[in-house]
Amino acid sequence: MPATTKTIAILVYEGVQTLDVAAPLDAFAAANDLRAASYTPVVISLDGAAITSETGLRLIPTCRLDALGEIDTLLIPGGIGLRTPHVAAAMSAAILARAEGVRRIVSVCTGIYGLAPTGLLDGLRATTHWKFAANVAAQFPKIQMESDALFIKQGRIFTAAGVTAAIDLALALIEADYGAALALAVARDLVVYVKRAGGQRQYSEPLQFQARAVGRFGELAAWIAANLHQKLPIETLAAQVNLSPRQFSRRFADVFDTSPAQYIETLRLDAARAQLTATAAQIAQIARAIGFASVDVFTRAFTRRFGLAPSEYRLRFKAAVGENHE
């Protein structure tokens, strides 16, 4: 194990998001367990007192922020508590007081509400949970907010999107410190992708569709997902819920806030991402299996949605999948 220990200080407060704390802790612990890194994760608070997370989990910090010695990385997790102005003001003052001696400063999700008032992000690109990006941009116009990024590095400052993006960010920090091989090993240990391509939108949209599906349309959503390989014209879909094509299109738009064609394309592209990273099937084979008319149509749709061609997307995960096949 490397001799130099890197202290990762996670600054908690009343109403912190549990996963924003636990996910990085687990990632850094996994790196240590693989005997390839030397991290010392420390949970701290402003006054050292025990706090309760959003979910009711009681956390007992190791010490106060001002009592901690050298800090390599200061991580500010998100949570409802930090979205309270007086808490954000106290946190930002404490962060700014320690900032000069810290190698890296990291905010996860709405942890940006503690980091933004320090002015350290002024003029820089940053991200947060997509649901709060517009609010942050309005409060802090000097920050260049990007609502679809999973995480952004600007010099020594990192910002990450919501909740599980904390894992993406932790893996990026591990890769920067100890190399891609360890980051991949930790990702395998945690059973996650070492790098997720695309942004937040690709993960939120399919879940929104599922949440809206009720009654007959709930059954239809499951049927569509199981039959993506087939041609799915409006007439076939309408028959599944005993509606005329015209009635179906109107009702579908009311339920899902999108057209049947766009909905089906989203499900097909989501299935494509899974196959590209979990199998070594040829791209043309994947295109056929999920119902695209040709590999060209599939490639254009995939690139338009995720900003990467299918082959480029697969290359990011080839170490986990094995040999890449075109």
Image (tube, helix red, strand yellow):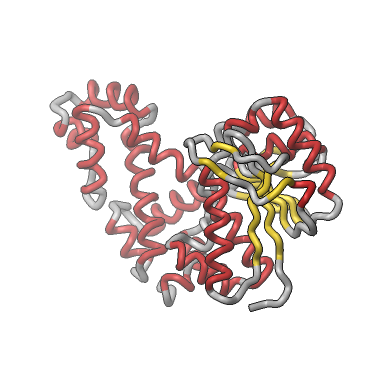
Report the side of 132 relative to 153 (left or right): left
Residue 223 x, y percent position in the rendering: 20, 42
**Residue closest to the eye, 39 or 56:** 56
- Which residue is drawn at the image coordinates 38% and 43% (left, top)? 266
Report the side of 267 relative to 74 (left or right): left
Residue 265 x, y percent position in the rendering: 36, 44
Q: Quadrant of residue 210?
A: top left
Task: Check the picture and name the quadrant holding the N terminus.
Answer: bottom right
Q: Is residue 158 above or below residue 315?
A: above
Query: Looking at the image, can residue 146 be seen?
Result: no
Q: Is residue 17 above or below residue 180?
A: above
Residue 288 x, y percent position in the rendering: 29, 58
**Residue closest to the eye, 168 or 27:** 27
- Which residue is drawn at the image coordinates 39% and 52% (left, top)? 297
- Which residue is drawn at the image coordinates 62% and 33% (left, top)? 133
How many labels sit on residues? 0
Q: Is residue 124 above or below residue 314?
A: above
Query: Looking at the image, can residue 105 be seen?
Result: yes
Q: Quadrant of residue 287?
A: bottom left
Report the side of 206 relative to 59 (left or right): left
Task: Check the picture and name the quadrant holding the C terminus.
Answer: bottom left
- Which residue is drawn at the image coordinates 58% and 62% (left, top)? 28
Q: Quadrant of residue 162?
A: top right
